[in-house]
Image (spheres, grey):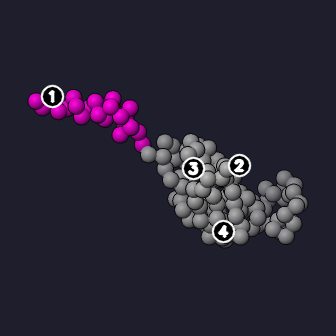
């Protein structure tokens, strides 16, 4: 009888669910991140035409749900870079002007390092694996 119970449990865990119970959950991004001195809230939102969006007016980042972890991490970091550049330069005064590479790198480097230092949960999320 004991062997049957063990076999049933193994089938449920490994076979009957496709191993679902053994697969780790995808880590969640932090809901609140400090970026270039700005408190930014991160949400899942159906985006329709894009994977992510930084809203400087509302201090929010919206992420398309359902992406693989590595791509979601990429999208979040991309949107955080928009926040860092937007708030570390005068880009908000001249949104039509593209920054040259050196200006962009110089402006974003300190903001990015500070953001990583101030947000250990973000660092854990960015380097996590499923």
Residue 65 higher or lower than 116, as above or below:
above
Mark 1 lies on residue: 3
Is residue 65 visible to us here?
yes
In this view, the mark in front (3 or 2): 2
Q: Earlier in the sequence, mark 2 or mark 1?
A: 1
Element at label 3: loop
- Mark 3 or mark 2: whose residue is earlier in sequence: 2
Q: Residue 41: x, y in percent? A: 59, 65
State left or right for residue 52 relative to residue 98: left
Whole-angstrom CA distance, mark 4 to mark 2, is 20 Å
Question: How far is disc 3 from disc 2 in space, using C-alphas?
Answer: 13 Å
Q: Main secondary structure of the magenta part?
A: helix
Camera-side residue: 122 or 57?
Answer: 57
The answer to if 9 sits in the magenta stretch is: yes
How far is disc 2 from disc 1 in space, using C-alphas?
Answer: 53 Å
- Residue 35 at what x, y percent from top left? 65, 65
Q: Is residue 130 left or right of residue 90?
A: left
**Mark-to-mark CA distance, 1 and 3:** 42 Å
- Mark 4 or mark 3, which has the lower sequence index? 4
> Residue sitting at 65 percent across and 53 percent down?
47
Front of the two marks 2 and 1: 2
Magenta span contains residue 37 = no
Quote the CA–CA distance across marks 1 and 4.
Answer: 57 Å
Residue 59 marker: 4
On the picture, is 116 further left or further right than 55? left
Name the element at disc 2. Answer: loop
């Amino acid at each position: 009888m004991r062997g049957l119970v063990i076999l049933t449990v193994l089938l449920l865990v490994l076979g009957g669910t496709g191993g679902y119970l053994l697969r780790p959950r995808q880590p969640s991004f932090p809901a609140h991140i400090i970026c270039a001195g700005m408190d930014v809230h991160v949400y899942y939102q159906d985006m329709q035409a894009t994977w992510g969006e930084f809203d400087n007016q509302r201090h929010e980042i919206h992420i398309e749900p359902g992406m693989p972890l590595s791509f979601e991490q990429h999208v979040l970091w991309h949107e955080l870079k928009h926040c860092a550049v937007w708030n570390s330069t005068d880009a908000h005064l001249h949104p039509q002007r593209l920054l040259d590479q050196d200006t962009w790198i110089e402006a974003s480097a300190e903001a990015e390092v500070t953001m990583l230092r101030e947000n250990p949960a973000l660092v854990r999320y960015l380097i996590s694996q499923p």
